[in-house]
Amino acid sequence: MTGRTAAIAALVVALTVAGDAQQGRTAGGTDAMSEISREYIRLVLAMGEHDKDYVDAYYGPEEVKAEAAKAKLSLDDIGARVTDLSARLGTLPAVGDELSRLRHQYVQKQLAAMTARVRMLKGERFTFDEESKALYDSVAPIYPESHFQAILDRLDTRFPGKGSLVDRYDAWHKPFVIPHDRLDAVFKMAIAACRERTLAHVTLPPDEQFTVEYVTNKSWSGYNWYQGQYKSLIQVNTDLPVYIDRAIDLACHEGYPGHHVYNALLEKHLVRERGWMEFTVYPLFSPQSLIAEGTANFGIEVAFPGRERVDFERARLFPLAGLDPARAAEYYEVMALVDQLSYAGNEAARRYLDGTTDRDAAIAWLERYALMAHDRAAQRVRFFDQYRSYVINYNYGKDLVRHYIESHGGTADHPDRRWQEFEKLLSSPRLPSGLR
């Protein structure tokens, strides 16, 4: 028996024992929710046969994956089965503790999102907002051009001179690129710091870990591929220059306390302890993604609140990258303003995907209102092509998560409570609509 086969066999046993302990048995001898969970997994995996981006992670029994591949379900078949499964779930009462009730709601919303994705794959067109509501249980706010222009006017005074603002900003930004030969060392130090800060507040499985790879030709800047057994593969895209702020951003977002921690806690608390098999699969185009991306982005502030990030980077990362530590405070003052332009990306995507603007105009919008250099703006439009309204999960997801955590007492002046509420959210099947 190979190591992976043994691990899967152990997981199946753990799921069975935990499931028996958590759920009552019906007269027929089979737990109804477990049946629904197994069919849900098969349908998510069947969707993956039609959409290469749909299954972000799966670490459940190989036999279920084989069943899904063998069935060769058409999109019509999947759609019909999802409708039937949703109806079956609707006949079950949402009972038990809070997590059990959240589980019931979660699976129902995930199934609704799958229905929408089936319709999209069959050629139906949604508006940007219709799509985000159907897939991610959320609609991001709309901002006028004047909102972004007011921020740009403030930045304009920081970079006097001739030429466009984006060119002047890009010229200022270039000295903060991490040299390629120092990239791995900087990332390793950033990861170690993020992990240390996370472990001071969150109890993780003792054997959790991830590996980092550097890749090219991607529409994203970083990606976490969760593999089960508390292991992840994190890929960092080096197509474009990597700026110093991306070290902590990616180390937190993809690793600690972001995606890696989120997936590990779901596996520990929901899969292994409760036997909820549906969490062994992660459909990317679903409400789960807003929680995943929102917590990963807010997790940066949780791990490095206030001035702590600038102080750490000035002392450790800037010198390691060969950058001037004296400019660390200046750098993050500017980046705080630039971050306020994040919703400009949503507006570009909304216009582009709604068909009110074309590719070149979307790139120009990002250059003007998001201060993206041409190559970075073009990469972002490639992201729109591939992932569409997924973009709202990063900024609007972060805002929803911040609101939820702070409304439960996890404010910046109560860091311990902030970590507690953050960990509770990471360990639960809460939906985006439950954050508002």
Image (cartoon, rainbow, N blue to C red):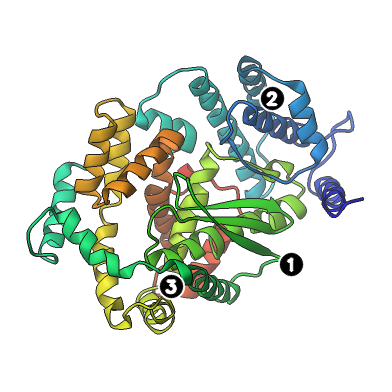
Please state the horizontal and vertical placement of residue 176, each as a whole percent of the image. 32, 69
Please state the horizontal and vertical placement of residue 30, each as a whole percent of the image. 85, 33
From this viewpoint, is residue 359 visible? yes
Question: In the rendered image of this protein, does residue 271 appear above or below residue 180?
Answer: above
Q: Is residue 205 left or right of residue 191?
A: right
Question: In the rendered image of this protein, does residue 107 appear above or below residue 125?
Answer: below
Give the CA distance from mark 3 to mark 2: 45 Å
Residue drawn at x 19%, y 54% is 166
Mark 1, residues whose alpha carbon is within 10 Å: few (<14), some, or many (≥20)?
few
Residue closest to the eye, 210 or 399: 210
Q: Are marks 3 and 1 in contact (CB under 8 Å)?
A: no
Residue drawn at x 46%, y 42% is 433
Which callout, 2 or 1, points at the residue further toward the start of the chain?
2
Q: Which mark is residue 207?
A: 1
Give the CA distance from mark 3 to mark 1: 25 Å
Please state the horizontal and vertical placement of residue 49, each as a whole percent of the image. 65, 28
Residue drawn at x 69%, y 41% is 278
Give the label, 3 or 2, closer to the camera: 3
* Amino acid identity at mark 2: Arg
* Amino acid identity at mark 3: Phe
Quarter assignment of residue 349: top left
Give the label, 2 or 1, closer to the camera: 1
* Amino acid identity at mark 1: Asp
Report which residue position mark 2 lands on: 88
Which callout, 3 or 1, points at the residue further toward the start of the chain?
1
Mark 2, residues whose alpha carbon is within 10 Å: few (<14), some, or many (≥20)?
few
Give the label, 3 or 1, closer to the camera: 1
Q: Count up the numbered dots.
A: 3
Report which residue position mark 3 lands on: 304
Extreme residue toward the right, this view:
1
